[in-house]
Amino acid sequence: MPRYHYIAIAATGKKVKGAITAESPYAARKQLRVRSVHPSSITQISSRAESRTALLSFLGRRNKAQIIDFTKQMATLLNSGIKLTEALSVLTLQISDTRFRNAIVDVRDRVITGESFTDALKDYGDYFDVIYVSMVRVGEVTGSLGQSFATIANFMEKRQRVESKVITAMIYPIVLVLFCIVAILVLTTQVIPKIGEQITRTGKELPWITERLMDFSYVMTSWWLLVVIASIVVIVWALKRFLRTSRGAYMRDKLLLSLPMFGPLIKQRVVARFASTLSTLLGSGLAMAESLRVVSEVTGNTIMKQAVRHARERILAGADIATPLKDSGVIDPAIAHMVAVGEKSGELETMLKSISDNLESSTDVVIERLSAAVEPVIIIIMAAVVGVIAYATILPILEASAGNF
């Protein structure tokens, strides 16, 4: 369904801006009039604008920190007895990001006209994912919206801490690799060609290793570089297209889980995410079948997604959820047994939280060990590559110098 950007006059006489989802411009105007908002301009958001929005999101304009801050403030305001519309009005004055503020203003206006808060949030999936919306729906139905927001904020902060640890562990190796690449490019495109030309002018032959680097330098400084770049772009594009298919996603996830060193870490992350999300949703009061549906959409792994969907089908048929999780190959038998025990004892939520905490603690240890092991390996490889290039650079100079004696 298309989205439209509108400029309108509210019932208070104030000029408002925002975005709305509707089947047509007429339907969009009709929706706005129901909210006592009189549109003066409605334009459909083009694919180019959506691409720009995606780019802004990638660059961090729609960062998770502002969503977490908004959620925590909503929890504080609602738990202190302030009405939902008043809380939204207060927060619109504090949000610095224009796009996010317009989204919240639109949500508030729709709630004022009697629309469900959950339905209003659902139209802004870039900010509020399916987990967020599902937990808000439970809070709205049960009348515990403030507690739901507090739970969502804790859940998001916990997930952000885990992601930050992984990103922090990757920064140093990435910097080393980038430095190595820059050093290689400078040596092969600037230093070696000049030395090779000077020695060739004297009539002496270059060592084979230097000749190979000269060939590489020629590729990097000629039109062949465009061919290499074009080939890489085509390969990456084709690979991305393939990975978007169900078969490609399945093969990718299966390969990731089978990697020698990183496979166990990825598996732990997937299972911990599953356990943490399901525990949070069940704790918020969402039914088991609905919780599994939500988890299947955010698990981030195709194999785990299939297992969760299978488990949901078994739940609807009156069976257990532990068996399909165990058969997936992602969850270890010991963890599947713990899930089964929690299910039989009626303490599944507590058991899942315990599993999530244990796996996250174990993941921290694995990340630290991998980081400690990967960094020296990268340094050794970088030193070896730069050393070979330095050897190929110095060798012809030494041979030319030896020939002069």
Image (spheres, helix red, strand yellow):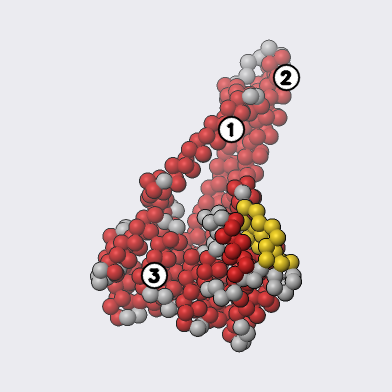
Q: Identify which residue is drawn at 68% across, 12% down.
A: 203
Q: Identify which residue is drawn at 44% across, 42% down.
A: 242
* Residue 51 in the image, given as x and y percentages of width and height: 61, 49
Q: Identify which residue is drawn at 52% across, 69% down.
A: 119
Residue tagged by mark 2?
A: 198
In the rendered structure, which amino acid carries the disc numbered 3?
Answer: Glu
In the rendered structure, which disc, 3 or 1, sits on the residue that comes first in sequence?
1
* Residue 44 in the image, given as x and y percentages of width and height: 62, 52
In the rendered structure, which disc, 3 or 2, sits on the residue that comes first in sequence?
2
Q: Quadrant of residue 12?
A: bottom right
* Separation of residues labelled 3 and 2 (CA atoms): 73 Å
Query: In this rendering, which labeled residue sits more in front, label 1 or label 2?
Result: 1
Residue tagged by mark 1?
A: 229
Query: In this rendering, which labeled residue sits more in front, label 3 or label 2?
Result: 3
Q: Is residue 81 above or below residue 64?
A: below
Q: Determine the secondary structure under disc 1.
A: helix
Q: Is residue 134 above or below residue 214?
A: below
Depth check: 106 or 277 in front? Answer: 106
**Label 3: few (<14), some (14–19) or many (≥20) C-alpha neighbours in 10 Å:** some
In the rendered structure, which amino acid carries the disc numbered 1?
Answer: Ile
Q: Quadrant of residue 92?
A: bottom right
Q: Quadrant of residue 396?
A: top right
Mark 3 near mark 2, Cβ–Cβ under 8 Å?
no
Residue 15 appears left or right of 263: right
* Residue 341 in the image, given as x and y percentages of width and height: 29, 76
Q: Determine the secondary structure under disc 2.
A: helix
Residue tagged by mark 3?
A: 290
- Quadrant showing the C terminus: top right
**Label 1: few (<14), some (14–19) or many (≥20) C-alpha neighbours in 10 Å:** few
